Image: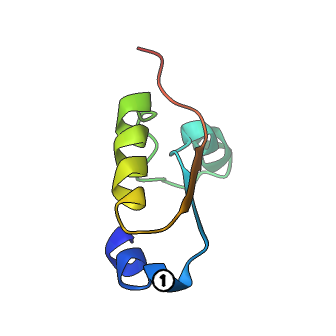
């Protein structure tokens, strides 16, 4: 995704990164649907900030991130 963004950075005004949220696991469980990401944990703040810096390095001026992170 960031490769895609970096090739088009001059056309992008904003990139918003949303950290992975595993709260949907219960929804899939109730629907009896196997969700491959059910055991994936939350990202750490450090991991999200690393992705933030990578996104900024593409040249996009307005990069934001939001979402839950794992408590360390």
Percent across and percent down for residue 60 are 48, 68
Residue 56 or 72: which is nearer the viewer?
A: 56
Image quadrant in which the N terminus is located:
bottom left
Percent across and percent down for residue 4 are 38, 80
Q: Is residue 70 visible?
A: yes
- Relative horizontal placement of residue 52, taking residue 23 as reference (left or right): left
Residue 56 or 21: which is nearer the viewer?
A: 56
At 51% across and 30% down in the image, what residue appears?
Answer: 69
Image quadrant in which the C terminus is located:
top left
Q: Picture quarter containing residue 24?
A: top right
Mark 1 highlights which residue?
10
Q: Secondary structure at mark 1?
A: helix
Percent across and percent down for residue 25 are 57, 42
Percent across and percent down for residue 56 are 42, 58
At 50% across and 45% down in the image, what residue appears?
Answer: 20
Q: Picture quarter containing residue 8?
A: bottom left
- Relative horizontal placement of residue 70, taking residue 18 as reference (left or right): left
At 45% across and 78% down in the image, what residue appears?
Answer: 9
Q: Is residue 58 above or below residue 32?
A: below
């Amino acid at each position: 995704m960031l490769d895609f963004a970096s090739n088009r950075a001059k056309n992008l005004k904003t990139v918003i990164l949303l950290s992975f949220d595993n709260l949907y696991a219960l929804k899939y469980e109730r629907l009896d649907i196997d969700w491959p990401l059910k055991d994936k944990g939350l990202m750490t703040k450090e991991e999200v900030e690393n992705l933030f810096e990578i996104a900024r390095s593409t040249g996009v001026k307005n990069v934001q991130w939001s979402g839950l992170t794992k408590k360390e």
